[in-house]
Image (spheres, rainbow, N blue to C red):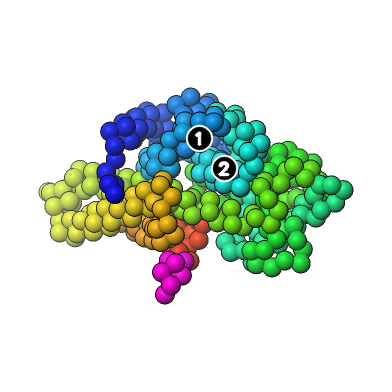
Amino acid sequence: MNFALSEEQEMLRMTARRFLDERAGSDVVRNLMETAAGFDAALWQEIAAQGWQGMAIPEEYGGAGFTFMEQAILMEEMGRSLFPAPYLSSIVLGADLVLTAGTEEQKQTILPDVASGEIRLAVAHLESGGRWDATGIEMTATNEGGGFVLEGAKFFVIDGHTADSLIVVARTDPSSSGSDGISLFLLPADTDGIESRRVETMDQTRKQAEITFAAVRVPATAMLGDPGSGWSSLQEMLQRAVVALAFEQVGGAQQCLDMSVEYAKARIQFGRPIGSFQAIKHKCADMLVAIESARSAAYYAGWAASVGDEDLAIAAPLAKSYCSETYSHAAGENIQIHGGIGFTWEHDAHLFFKRAKTDEILFGTPADHRAALADALGL
């Protein structure tokens, strides 16, 4: 196996970086995070024109037909710039789940519009308990009159308030427990009975919503895939999602290191750059070692996800747990190295710190993923 990027992948990285530097700089991020939507629809269409949304969607469904690795490269570059767009929610989560669970007809119907940027998806998974395991699913989908009636509420739905369509996780068997009897439903976000409310969270660059479902009636064709198979499909998708998030964390951590080094070279104290002091050197060196290790873990997991290797069950939780802690550490050290200015609202250091702390618990904490890693290894 070779974890070095190909010439085409390096070109994709540099093209994405140049675009994000030019079109999604700090001023753009700060402006968009103050808006209710949290993203720019015109900018979303610009990246759609470059094929970003359809990068890992097969050509027969309107995508570009590349692998997971190309999509992960984009996630790393977006993490570096804190790009405010519903890419994680609509593409990494939504489109992947349709590919994993959907019927051929459902894929043909929804994915071309997702790949073109015309439709944005959101996955409504977590409930009030905030549990990522199957016991946290209490929302019901009652079979009635040839269709289903959805009742319940979903919390922490990434970009749920701006999504065009929702993929909802619910129990179709009220007597079931654990992972049994859980199904998925794909329905328009403006269906009668659905109410969405944006909620304030630590990371203002990635919006979340609370969505309630009050006697929401949907046809039987709204079910995504087979009855009762929802949990296995969701877990398969989330395994790849944590790897994509690890790439985002590597990109953010690298940016924190770059910011720290740049400041350490320019900030003068006692007649010399603070980067010449041993304590600052050690901080930057430790960050570098940790980030390179995190990058190796993420790229190994990215390779496993791209080729469908069975090692993904080990590589994914390893990457998520290590990259989460590395990003949080790098974001904290970035503030420390910047000193007083790093604590101010005007400086971008706090934006990376908030993203790092939010990403750390997204899709499960490092402790959760270390437990999953231990289970995968039979420990």
Provide the residue designation for mark 1: 58
**Which label sits on residue 273?**
none
- The range drawn in magenta is 372-379
- The residue drawn where x is 80% and y is 49% is 148
The amino acid type, in three-letter code, at marker 1 is Pro
Give 262 or 251, whichever is nearer the viewer.
251
- The residue drawn where x is 85% and y is 51% is 144
Across and down, in percent, residue 298 comes to 36, 52
Q: Residue 230: name its quadrant.
A: bottom right
- Magenta segment, prevailing SS (helix, strand or loop): helix
Mark 1 closeness class: few <14, some 14–19, many ≥20 residues within 10 Å: some
The residue at the far right in this view is 145
Is residue 375 one of those drawn in magenta?
Answer: yes
- The residue drawn where x is 44% and y is 26% is 50
Q: Residue 139: name its quadrant.
A: bottom right
Dot 1: what SS? Answer: loop
Residue 173 located left or right of residue 258: right
Provide the residue designation for mark 2: 99
Comes first in the chain, label 2 or label 1: 1
Give 231 or 352, whichever is nearer the viewer.
231
Whether residues under marks 2 and 1 lie with C-beta atoms below 8 angstroms apart, the answer is yes
